[in-house]
Amino acid sequence: MMKNAKLNWVRLPIDNLENCRELGGYSTEYGQQTKWHTFLRSSDMSRLSREDIVFLKEYGVKTVIDLRGEDEIETHKNPLAEEDFCEYYNIPFITERVSDITLSTYEISMGDFYIDLLEQNDAVKRIFDVIEQAEEGCIVFHCQAGKDRTGLLAMLLLGLAGVEKKDIVSNYEVTYTNLESMHQNESLYGNIPMEFLYSNRDYILKAYEYIYHTYQSFDQYLMAKGVEMDVIDRIKRRFLGLGETAAAS
């Protein structure tokens, strides 16, 4: 039986996507709720079947932002890149080729690794400019595991919308639970430290607190990375469903 793509799913019922989740349904400090069918965060999408692709199309996906590097895409292509119902963008959100990462590459904590990613000005600006210019509909963004690069972007979007810190943290923590196929693996590629597979709350908290201590707010952080204030405002409105007849109440 075909699953109803028009329903609001917390984790999408797609067997070939272990960690594809909604950012809709969160309460915000503005008294709003983040809008369903607007942002999806996901893990590797290379195993999507034709039925899965149809489901995502019916779910409203119009834009795909692939945060992976060239080496990852070579071995795990996203089939949505070839579909005509959505626009596909590859914006690498990492400083190293993932296949080259070893234990000595980052002799730092995961939180420090996240801070390194957050300071990639060009990537952050490109990602948010693409989001702001995207066609009306759902935007799905993903990396390989859907934890680190994807988790940071989810944090930025939820933070921008005014979602409470504990909800942002819990959204991040669910990832390792969802990635059941990885639990028996020593690492993702064979040379990445096991620590890189976990979604410990301390990892994302370090990134969250870094933004507040360094920039005072998510808005100020994005502006420091070159994102225009009107772009930030339009993304907020998109995520909160403001300016629409259905959301007028």
Image (cartoon, grey):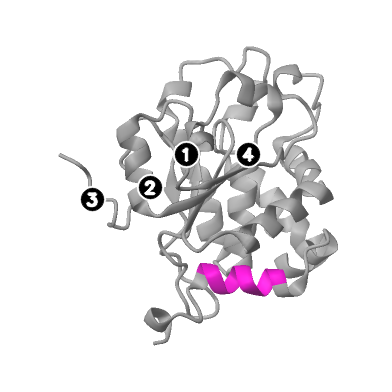
Say whether disc 3 or disc 1 marks the residue closer to the N-terminus.
Answer: 3
Q: Residue 88: where, in percent of width, then height?
A: 58, 43
Say whether disc 2 or disc 3 marks the residue closer to the N-terminus.
Answer: 3
Say whether disc 3 or disc 4 marks the residue closer to the N-terminus.
Answer: 3
Residue 103 falls in which quadrant of the image? top right
Say whether disc 1 or disc 2 marks the residue closer to the N-terminus.
Answer: 2
Three-letter residue code for mark 2 = Lys
Three-letter residue code for mark 3 = Asn
Instruction: Tell me the distance, in whole angstroms, between the alpha carbons under discs 2 and 3.
Output: 12 Å
Q: Which of the numbered marks, if any, corresponds to residue 5?
A: none
Q: Which residue is mark 1?
A: 83
Disc 2 is placed on an element classified as: helix
Disc 3 is placed on an element classified as: loop
Q: Which residue is mark 4?
A: 148
Instruction: Tell me the distance, in whole angstroms, between the alpha carbons under discs 3 and 4.
Output: 29 Å
Q: Which residue is mark 3?
A: 4
Q: Nearer the viewer, mark 1 or mark 2?
A: 1
Q: Quadrant of the C terminus?
A: bottom left
Residue nearer the viewer, 220 or 133: 133
* On screen, residue 53 above or below 86: above
Q: Residue 45: where, in percent of width, then height?
A: 48, 32
Residue at 22%, 45% (x, y): give it.
3
Q: Which residue is mark 2?
A: 57
Residue nearer the viewer, 209 or 65: 65
Q: Do residues under tags 2 and 4 come within 8 Å of each other at their CB atoms?
A: no
* On screen, residue 194 above or below 142: above
Residue 6 falls in which quadrant of the image? bottom left
